[in-house]
Amino acid sequence: MNPFLTSKVKERSGGRMVYLGFCAFMELIIVVAIINLLQEENWGAALLGLLLILGFARPIIREIIKEKDFKNAKVIASYLNGIPSESIKMAQIKQNIRMDDPVKQIDRLLKKEYLMNIHLDWEKELVVLLALGSSNRYVEISCPNCGAKTVVLQGRVKNCEYCGSTLLGNKSE
Ligand SMILES: [Zn+2]
């Protein structure tokens, strides 16, 4: 399992596909019905059909967006999994991941909880990876002195980059 992908990102379930197939089938039937109603100049019923089309389109559109998000999450996660260091420059990600604004996508996918163990450091323009393999785990902490957010290898100590306070990487996730 990729350490940056959450369990939300998984393969489609069969039942869901049957439901979506049903929605698509209904769309087709309604379109044919609307064409007939328009020929009969039955405007009221045609309008009702149009509303039905929108209703059945919603789950289909939502699924298409989700499918795209899952695909992007997998592309980003597999790219980050191949990075040997604990952080990577945002500019480098923009160059290497073929996607519209991949950093913004990471931010979006983190909020949707499709991606995890990634911290975006906007100030330093870094994408910080909080999981390196299974034994070296980074934890995100706030400096108790100045409040700056940073990451520390679990169980290790380091000094705050901003105020020099000693920071302990002991917050469990
Ligand atoms: Zn500090």
Image (spheres, rainbow, N blue to C red):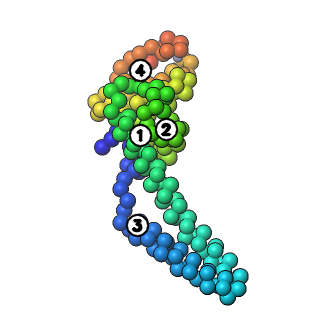
Question: In the rendered structure, which amino acid carries the disc numbered 4?
Answer: Leu
Quarter of the image containing the N terminus?
top left
Q: Check disc 2 and report the residue beneath it.
A: 102
Mark 2 vs mark 3: in front: 2
Disc 1 crowd rating (10 Å Cα; few below 14, some 14-19, many 20+) is many
Q: Residue 13: x percent and y percent?
A: 36, 62
Task: Evaluate if marks 3 and 4 touch, with contact meaning CB atoms under 8 Å apart.
Answer: no
Q: CA distance from mark 1 to mark 2?
A: 8 Å
- Residue for badge 4: 168
Label 2: how many residues lie within 10 Å, few (<14), some (14-19) or many (20+)?
Answer: many
Amino acid at the residue labelled 1? Ile
Q: Name the residue carrying label 1.
A: 76
Residue at coordinates 56% horizontally, 18% vertically from top-left?
146
Q: Secondary structure at mark 4?
A: strand
Amino acid type at mark 3: Met
- Badge 2 or badge 4: first in the primary sequence: 2
Residue found at x 41% / y 20%: 168
Give the distance between the C-alpha atoms of the residues marked 4 and 1, in whole angstroms.
30 Å
Ligand 1 contact, mark 4 (Cβ < 8 Å): no
Element carrying mark 3 = helix
Task: Give the residue drawn at x 41%, y 25%.
Answer: 87
Q: Secondary structure at mark 1?
A: helix
**CB under 8 Å between discs 4 and 1:** no
- Mark 3 or mark 4: which is in front? 3
- Tell which circle, 1 or 3, labels the residue nearer the N-terminal end: 3
Of callouts 1 and 2, the N-terminal one: 1
Q: Nearer the viewer, mark 2 or mark 4?
A: 2
Q: Which residue is mark 3?
A: 17
Q: Are marks 2 and 4 in contact (CB under 8 Å)?
A: no
